[in-house]
Image (tube, rainbow, N blue to C red):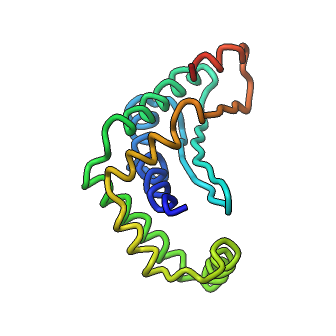
Amino acid sequence: DERRFGLKLLSVILGENMSSRLFQILRERHGYCYSVQTNMVTLDDTGAIHISAGLDPGKLQKAVKMILKELESICRKKPGKDELRKAQDYTIGQTLMGLESTTNQMIWMGESLLGYGKILDPAEVEQRLCSVTPEDIQQIACHCLNRGRLGVAVVGPLKDSSSLQNWLG
């Protein structure tokens, strides 16, 4: 799916580094969690974006509500050009730095062959990432982060799990 480049940038904007939206809001501004991060998985016929946070169970409901608010925010208002450019620079930099390792180069080639039937050229990936627009990010966010598509899992002590479903409602 060609939207995978935009999905990667959406993941970076939301939570793949310390300047990401969720990190800044949940950890730095409100102190709800020690860690919060996003990542994505793309497979041949499906994919997913994950958000995870390590936090005190007493702060779970507030954190979930804040995460949902941020997901809705990126659907209502596209990211700014500067925010997108930072995400593009970060992603390209991480990719190129990762390819400094011979092992990572072999993994890149293997995943490319298995997933796409050809070895992806890092320069082509960079060009594709740079061609993503703020409007693309917003459209992908509205599609992938739609509440009807969301699922929640809690690992750890939770007194009343029945209310968890209501938080997504």
Q: Residue at horizontal 30%, vertical 52%?
A: 83
Taking 11 as reference, is 104 above or below it? below
User: Relative to residue 149, is residue 156 drawn left or right?
Assistant: right
Q: Residue at horizontal 51%, vertical 21%?
A: 62
User: Relative to residue 166, is residue 133 drawn left or right?
Assistant: left
Q: Residue at horizontal 55%, vertical 42%?
A: 35
Given residues 11 and 143, the one toward you in this image is 143
Taking 139 as reference, is 9 above or below it? below
The spot of residue 17 in percent (x, y) is 45, 53
The spot of residue 132 in percent (x, y) is 36, 61
The spot of residue 139 in percent (x, y) is 41, 46
Quarter occupied by the N terminus:
bottom right
User: Relative to residue 79, is residue 34 drawn left or right?
Assistant: right
Q: Residue at horizontal 59%, vertical 24%?
A: 60
The spot of residue 89 in percent (x, y) is 36, 66
Taking 108 as reference, is 161 above or below it? above
User: Which quarter of the picture shows residue 102?
Assistant: bottom right
Q: How many marks?
A: 0
Quarter occupied by the C terminus:
top right
